[in-house]
Amino acid sequence: MNNTYHVPVLLKESINGLNILPNGVYVDATYGGGGHTREILNHLNSSGKVIAFDQDADAIENQIDDNRLKLIKSNFKYLPNHLKYLQINKIDGLLADFGISSYQIDNQIRGFSIRFDSDLDMRMNKYQKKDAKHILNNYSSNDLNYIFKNFGELKNHKKVTQIIISQRSKQKIVTTGDLIRILKPISPLKNNNKFLAKIFQAIRIEVNDELLVIKKLLEASSKYLNKGGRLVCISYHSLEDRLVKRYIQNGSFNQQVESDIYGNKDTFFKKIGKIVTPSEDELNKNKRSRSAKLRIAEKI
């Protein structure tokens, strides 16, 4: 396994949150470098199992050699399909770390980082057709406005869209350097990196349908977790965390708990403990963990 691929965030806290049964069946929805999966396996006996998912072909190369592990090259939104194929009806815990991996950020050809002048790609699955170039050069102004407003939470989303529409009519936007250059006239003098990070976040979320697949995973968790099974989610920005928080609290992605015609509250989980953030020691060792938020819930 490539230990430099990704440093697992909140490792001890997330594994403790799973409350692992030695003979249980667990899902790691975001395999990455395999750090969380390896620790789950360390808590299992010979009867325990881990079903792990990752759509990035580079992550699959980090597969741990253990017959208790089934690593599936797929987006975790297809979890129900694969569990059905494996004849698994229930699981005892589900762990999801929604952040992009250090490898993806540091890879100069993937287009995830503002640090490198690279192809505007941003696909977590390198075999899908839609990439960042397609979005920036083909989406309508209304669609771009929606992305930058809702996925980047940018107040000046209309200005961002206008300058992209104007510049792409002159020349196709191909690289991260192209994008950063055309945004320079509206980039703030202070917190420029934060502004660009929001732009890149918005495009990346759209490229990979990130919020939609998180919703699908959360909905699947309520169907497949055994009573007493644990849901453990690590989020890195407010859009992800809001979905997790609402689903745990309300059983939906709405702000209020939904009820059936008899007034029964349609919730699936009870919250376990308070929100967990990285310790000072972890922050010193891994600065990229600074925005991580861990939520734990138990199926009722």
Image: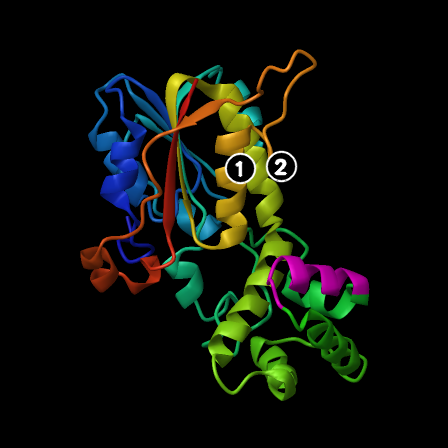
Q: Is residue 214 above or below residue 228?
A: below
- Image quadrant assignment for residue 188: bottom right
> Closest to the observer: 32 or 290?
290
What is the count of numbered marks? 2
Residue most extreme to the front: 263
Residue 26 rendering spot, x and y as whole percentages = 36, 26
Residue 259 rendering spot, x and y as whole percentages = 63, 21
Amino acid type, residue under disc 2 in the picture: Asn
Q: Is residue 32 above or below residue 133?
A: above
Amino acid type, residue under disc 1 in the picture: Arg
- Which residue has dot 2 on it? 254
Instruction: Give left or right: position of 123 versus 56.
Output: right
Residue most extreme to the top: 262
SS at mark 2?
loop
- Image quadrant assignment for residue 195: bottom right
Bounds of the magenta span? 142-154
**Disc with the residue nearer the chain's start (1 vs 2):** 1
**Residue 64 visible in the snapshot:** no
Query: Which residue does the image show at 48% across and 84% down from the upper left?
Result: 190
Residue 179 rendering spot, x and y as whole percentages = 62, 78
Query: Which residue does the image show at 27% across and 31% down from the upper left?
Result: 66
Report crowding for label 1: few under 14, some 14 to 19, many 20 or more residues within 10 A (C-alpha). Answer: some
SS at mark 1?
helix
Main SS of the magenta part reads helix
User: Marks 1 and 2: CB-CB under 8 Å?
Assistant: yes
Query: Which residue does the image show at 48% across and 32% down from the upper left?
Result: 248
- Which residue has dot 1 on it? 246
Report crowding for label 2: few under 14, some 14 to 19, many 20 or more residues within 10 A (C-alpha). Answer: few
